[in-house]
Image: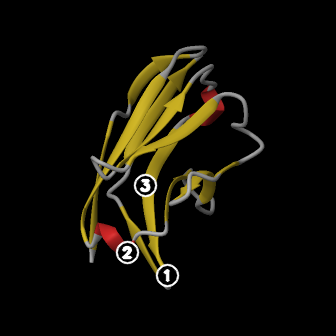
Amino acid sequence: QVQLVESGGGLVQAGGSLRLSCAASGSVFSIKSMGWYRQAPGKQRELVAVITSDGTTTYASSVKGRFTISRDNAKNTVYLQMNSLKPEDTTVYYCAAVTGPYHYWGQGTQVTVSS
């Protein structure tokens, strides 16, 4: 079992920045990759960014160049630095951890970008 606790969401003006954090606990040794997803009301959850255990990163085209995912293995924490935020980035962001066949999810953190 892996537990994920997110923090760092909030309200920011367009063009501003926020940093999300996700701390993992439990069976962290089994984590293959961690990432961030977001889900707007009435829409499917979509990938924002993922980082594997060897540091390989993948980004959604909509955030590439604006968002950066990183991880601190010593702290079992993954970060999402979000710059140049746009109103369309407004939604709930979820942290995820993959351990082979299992996906674990955080509780979600709200990001609101005002125009």
Instruction: Please tell me the numbered disc located at residue 95.
Output: 3
Mark toward the start of the polypeptide (3 vs 1):
3
SS under mark 2? helix
Quadrant assignment for the C terminus: top right
Question: Label 1 is placed on what type of residue?
Answer: Gly
Which is closer to the viewer, label 3 or label 1? 1
Question: Label 3 is placed on what type of residue?
Answer: Cys
Quadrant of the image occupied by residue 7? top left
**Spatial CA span between label 3 and label 1:** 16 Å
Horizontally, residue 49 falls left or right of residue 7, namely right
SS under mark 1? loop
Question: Label 2 is placed on what type of residue?
Answer: Ser
89 vs 33: above or below: above
At label 3, counting other C-alpha atoms closer than 10 Å, the crowd grade (few under 14, some 14-19, many 20 or more) is many
- Determine whether label 2 and label 1 are within 8 Å by CB: yes
- Determine whether label 2 and label 3 are within 8 Å by CB: no
Which residue corresponds to mark 1?
A: 100
SS under mark 3? strand
Horizontally, residue 66 falls left or right of residue 29, namely right
105 vs 16: above or below: below
Please provide percent x and percent y for residue 48. Answer: 61, 49
Mark toward the start of the polypeptide (2 vs 1):
2
Q: Which residue extends farthest left? A: 26
The residue under the point 52% across, 25% down is 113
Mark toward the start of the polypeptide (2 vs 3):
2
Which residue corresponds to mark 2?
A: 30
The residue under the point 31% across, 53% down is 76
Quadrant assignment for the N terminus: bottom left
Instruction: Please tell me the numbered disc located at residue 109.
Output: none
**Frontmost residue, 21 versus 94:** 21
